[in-house]
């Protein structure tokens, strides 16, 4: 591990993955992020060597994040710069130093460009553009719009435009990017508000979709509220629901540890939601969730994604009224809700237990202060 001192007088620890710009002996800059202290320009500086370069955006982003060092330079390079504008930028910098600083430019420069950028051409269908934008723009008008944006365009067929993307437009890679440029230049305010046609896809008629619809309707009728949780969670939360160390589906580049793992069951998310409600003095909670979970599969195979149902009941089964007093929720309240679900799904032969697991359905309960917390977890696809 190498250490360098940057222009902000901070010592930085580098790894083999960090790209450096060096002279014959020592580093003079962390490429695309910040120069080193030995490259500082002072009042005594008489000669300046100008380097103009293009750096791979992901590499600069990884270095900037690893060092915790965000600069104007890293901001630009992370988002991509014009690889064909390197020499132009070099000459412009030299000219400004001559004009504003009274310097003298030494003739000549060295250009190392071993793999020139290949020209990028994107095919765009006017019919697809009009469908996506909800417009009726003529293909000739689209061509004029793109030409005005320096996107040289040819009408290649009855329903095809071929767009040549210049090097400074690093944001245009696909057909939809071209369509966005057409819509932006045409003017989003000029596009009338329309509604997409309502279609009934095959997924709406799938058996699982019908099952989940029945489950939602039944539990809502029983007084539960549907909860929509985030699939990403902390492994620490999931560990509390496993008796031994479990294997989870991990996210390669997580935002944080709290969102680094895909949940393999729904109940932990419901319990977190319950804790937040109780901490805010909302103690009568009835929640359920019907969502996919993610479970590890064999090496090299994508994770299994079964659809699970989880429900949670906490606090009072019903508020007090003239006809009855407060009654804490217990096992039989959620048992009744579960029986309603099974009856709606026409499932027979289901047994209940205060602990353990029965086939693909399990019900459990535990004492929490003076409340009963009852929970159900089931795999709908079984």
Image (cartoon, rainbow, N blue to C red):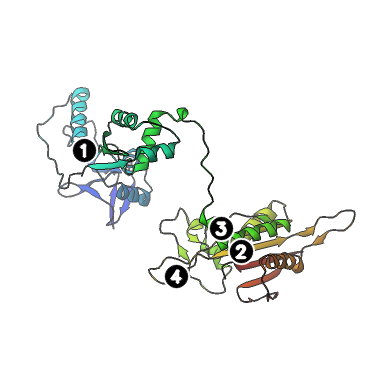
Q: Select label 4 or label 1 by which is in front.
A: 4
Cβ atoms at labels 4 and 3 below 8 Å apart: no
Q: CA distance from mark 2 to mark 3?
A: 19 Å
The structure residue drawn at horizontal position 46% and vertical position 30%, both measured from the top left corner, is 191
Residue mark closest to the camera, 1 vs 3: 3
Report the residue marked by disc 1. Answer: 84
**Residue 381 left/right relative to 139:** right
Q: Which residue is mark 4?
A: 297
Residue contact between numbered discs 2 and 1, judged by CB atoms under 8 Å = no
Q: Which mark is residue 205?
A: 3
| SS for dot 4 | loop
Alpha carbon separation for disc pair 4 and 3: 28 Å
Mark 1 / mark 3, whichever is N-terminal:
1
Report the disc number at residue 309.
2
Instruction: Between label 4 and label 3, give the one nearer the viewer.
Output: 3
Task: Please tell me whether mark 2 sits on a helix, a strand or a loop.
Answer: strand
Question: Could you tell me which quadrant the C terminus lies in?
Answer: bottom right
Of badges 2 and 1, nearer the viewer stands: 2
Mark sitting earlier along the chain (2/3): 3
Callout 4 environment at 10 Å: few (<14), some (14 to 19), or many (20+)?
Answer: few
- N-term-proximal mark, 4 vs 3: 3
Query: Residue 184: image x %, image y %?
Result: 40, 32
- Image coordinates for residue 131, horizontal then vertical, percent: 43, 39
Could you say whether the residue bearing mark 3 is in a helix, strand or loop?
helix
Q: Secondary structure at mark 1?
A: helix
> Mark 4 or mark 1: which comes first in sequence?
1
């Amino acid at each position: 591990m190498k250490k360098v001192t940057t222009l902000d007088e901070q010592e930085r620890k580098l790894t083999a993955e960090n790209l450096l710009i060096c002279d014959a002996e020592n580093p003079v800059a962390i490429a695309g992020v910040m120069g080193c202290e030995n490259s500082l320009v002072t009042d005594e500086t008489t000669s300046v060597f100008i380097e103009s370069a293009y750096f791979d955006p992901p590499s600069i982003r990884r270095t900037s994040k690893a060092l915790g060092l965000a600069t104007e330079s890293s901001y630009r390079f992370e988002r991509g710069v014009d690889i064909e504008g390197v020499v132009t930028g070099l000459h412009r910098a030299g000219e400004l130093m001559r004009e504003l600083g009274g310097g003298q430019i030494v003739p000549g420069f060295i250009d190392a460009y071993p793999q020139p950028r290949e020209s990028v051409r994107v095919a765009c269908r006017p019919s697809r553009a009009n469908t996506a934008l909800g417009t009726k723009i003529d293909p000739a008008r689209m061509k004029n719009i793109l030409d005005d944006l320096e996107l040289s365009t040819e009408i290649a067929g009855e329903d095809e435009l071929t767009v040549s993307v210049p090097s400074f437009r690093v944001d245009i890679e696909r057909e939809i990017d071209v369509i966005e440029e057409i819509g932006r230049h045409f003017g989003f305010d000029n596009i009338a508000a329309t509604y997409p046609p309502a279609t009934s896809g095959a997924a709406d008629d799938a058996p699982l979709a019908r099952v989940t619809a029945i489950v939602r309707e039944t539990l809502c009728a029983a007084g539960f509220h549907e909860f929509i949780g985030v699939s990403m969670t902390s492994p620490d939360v999931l560990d509390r629901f496993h008796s031994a160390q479990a294997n989870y589906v991990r996210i390669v580049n997580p935002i944080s540890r709290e969102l680094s793992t895909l949940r393999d069951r729904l109940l932990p998310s419901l319990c977190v939601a319950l804790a937040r409600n109780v901490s805010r003095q909302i103690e009568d909670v009835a929640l359920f969730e019907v969502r996919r979970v993610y479970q590890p599969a064999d090496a090299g195979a994508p994770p299994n994604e079964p659809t699970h149902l989880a429900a949670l009941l906490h606090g009072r089964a019903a508020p007090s009224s003239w006809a009855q007093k407060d009654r804490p929720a217990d096992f039989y309240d959620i048992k009744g809700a579960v029986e309603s679900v099974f009856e709606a799904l026409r499932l027979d032969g289901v047994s209940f237990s205060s602990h353990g697991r029965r086939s693909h359905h399990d019900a459990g309960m535990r004492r929490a202060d003076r409340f009963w917390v009852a929970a159900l977890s089931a795999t709908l696809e079984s």
